[in-house]
Image: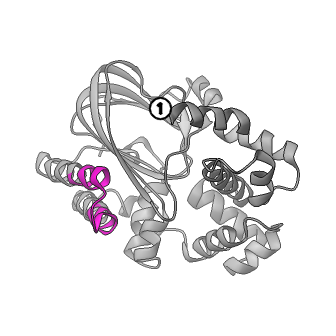
């Protein structure tokens, strides 16, 4: 549960949402987990308020911050765990120098393990964010220490990329989530307070179809048929589970693939646009700028500066 004494809802102060931009992290079907240590002396935790299509778990080791997430605002301090689902707008303002461990992962990590059972239920814990208490947990000192140890080990595996690291990362992530959610269940919170999870099987079938056909013209009827639901059910399930539409997800996926292709020096912007399913170059440039913050040409220039 979040700390009641210093959690505060400020629904009348939501102007920051106008500045929210999508952020992209180096995640893919091949590398579905990304781990980092954040050390921020003061000020905003990121350059601008952001959202991303991943799940996020963040534990605060030191320092303090004011966390903004959706329509909620609350204070975060050592011992807190922040749980964000896909497409949740959020950012923080550091009030005391902060150190945190952060893990981002694709929802498919949990779905691939157990799409009809505990995997779907754990994922529901991230997507059913109905209150500030569902976004920030403060486990017991013993549980928090075990979580810290596991995330530190995940960071080591991620940075060293040794034999078996991908499997080890998935195992540690699941172990970490089970540890936290069992603690929540013991306090009669977490999974139980959010009711039954939405059926993830049709969503995953739709995602699989989009990943396999993103270079083609894709219509709602095709995606719905692949998912085994009606078009209206498809819209509702995507909005409920991922916080976005299937069209927006497809756009982001295409841009994500385009960004990867632009790493290749032989690929032109035009070739990249057609390779990821866009039929109009101008539309591709507009969508790319919307999601990445820069044009494809500027993105290539930025890559060149880093190498």
Image spot of residue 142 (x, y percent): 11, 50
Over which residues does the magenta segment extend? 153-172
Inspect the magenta stretch and tell me whether residue 281 lies in it. no
On the image, numbered disc 1 is attached to which residue?
A: 91
Residue at 42% x, 49% y is 56
> Is disc 1 surrounded by few (<14), some (14 to 19) or many (20+) residues within 10 Å?
many
Q: Position of residue 5 (x, y in %)?
A: 27, 30
The answer to whether residue 230 is visible is no
Q: Nearer the viewer, residue 7 or 119?
A: 119
Is any part of residue 190 visible from this angle?
Answer: yes
In this view, the residue in front, 173 or 178, is 173
x, y percent for residue 43: 40, 18
Q: Residue at x 46, y 79 (%)?
A: 116
Quarter location, residue 297: top right
Q: Quadrant of residue 113?
A: bottom left
Q: Position of residue 106 (x, y in %)?
A: 48, 59
Is the stretch drawn in magenta largely helix, strand or loop?
A: helix
| 273 relative position to 79: left or right | right
Q: Is residue 223 above or below residue 93?
A: below
User: What secondary structure is found at the residue carrying circle 1?
Assistant: strand
Q: Is residue 12 left or right of residue 189?
A: right
In the image, 9 versus 59, the foreground residue is 59
């Amino acid at each position: 549960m979040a700390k009641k004494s210093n959690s505060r809802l400020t629904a009348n102060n939501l102007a920051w949402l106008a500045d929210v931009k999508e952020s992209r992290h180096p995640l893919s079907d091949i590398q579905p987990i990304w781990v980092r240590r954040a050390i921020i002396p003061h000020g905003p935790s990121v350059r601008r308020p952001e959202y991303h299509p991943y799940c996020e778990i963040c534990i605060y080791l030191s320092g303090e911050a004011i966390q903004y997430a959706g329509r909620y605002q609350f204070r975060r301090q050592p011992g807190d765990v922040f749980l964000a689902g896909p497409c949740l707008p959020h950012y923080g303002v550091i009030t005391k120098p902060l150190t945190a461990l952060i893990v981002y992962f694709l929802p498919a990590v949990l779905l691939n393990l157990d799409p009809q059972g505990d995997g779907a239920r754990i994922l529901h814990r991230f997507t059913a964010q109905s209150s500030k208490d569902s976004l920030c947990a403060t486990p017991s000192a013993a549980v928090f220490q075990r979580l810290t140890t596991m995330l530190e080990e995940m960071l080591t595996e991620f940075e060293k990329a040794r034999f078996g690291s991908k499997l080890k990362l998935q195992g540690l992530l699941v172990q970490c989530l089970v540890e936290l959610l069992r603690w929540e269940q013991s306090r009669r919170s977490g999974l139980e307070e959010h009711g039954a999870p939405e059926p993830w099987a049709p969503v995953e079938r739709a995602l699989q179809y989009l990943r396999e056909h993103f270079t083609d013209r894709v219509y709602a009827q095709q995606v719905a048929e692949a998912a085994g639901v009606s078009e209206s059910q498809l819209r509702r399930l995507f909005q409920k589970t991922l916080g976005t539409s299937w069209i927006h997800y497809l756009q982001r996926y295409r841009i994500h693939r385009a960004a990867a292709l632009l790493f290749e020096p032989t690929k032109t912007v035009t070739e990249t646009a057609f390779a990821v399913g866009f039929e109009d170059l101008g539309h591709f440039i507009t969508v790319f700028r919307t999601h990445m913050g820069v044009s494809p040409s500027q993105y290539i220039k930025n890559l060149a500066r880093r190498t």
